[in-house]
Image (spheres, rainbow, N blue to C red):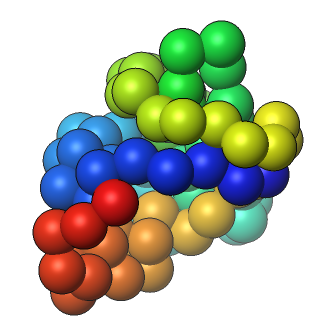
Amino acid sequence: MKFVCETSTLSLACQNVQRAVSSKSSIPGAEGILIKTTVNGLSLTGYDLEIGINTNIYAKVEEEGAIIINAKILCEILRKIPNQT
């Protein structure tokens, strides 16, 4: 998966979706955010096995794909990156 988007947009989407992600779970995937490419950009989804939040952002997708990334780590990294694409 390869894409280009605004760091601030991705960071805000991550923070929004992180609200539904379980911080402590025996299921590793429940602590992550699913990021997958769509026709218009990216779809970010977080679940805690009771509720889920999905948000879409614009991105230039160069290679399609999907991945689950630990929500806490991803959001911390995005906060520290300067606002760029």
Where residue 41 sits in the image (x, y, percent)?
Answer: 53, 26
Above or below, 62 against 32 in this view is above
Question: What is the quadrant of residue 58 in the picture?
Answer: top left
Left of 36 or right of it: where is 82?
left
Can you see residue 38?
Answer: yes
Above or below, 24 against 44 in this view is below
Point 44% across, 71% down: residue = 74
Which sits in the foreground, 42 or 69? 42
Above or below, 31 against 18 in this view is below
Where residue 18 sits in the image (x, y, percent)?
Answer: 34, 50
Can you see residue 19?
Answer: no
Left of 13 or right of it: where is 65?
right
The quadrant of the rendering that contains the C terminus is bottom left
Q: Number of callouts in the render?
A: 0
Point 18% across, 80% down: residue = 82
Question: What is the quadrant of residue 72 in the picture?
Answer: bottom left
Which sits in the foreground, 31 or 55? 55
Which sits in the foreground, 14 or 8? 8
Where residue 21 sits in the image (x, y, percent)?
Answer: 43, 48
Left of 14 or right of it: where is 47?
right
Above or below, 42 against 15 in this view is above
Point 47% across, 35% down: residue = 59
Point 81% across, 43% down: residue = 63
Left of 17 or right of it: where is 59?
right
> Which residue lies most toward the top here?
39
Where residue 1 sits in the image (x, y, percent)?
Answer: 79, 51
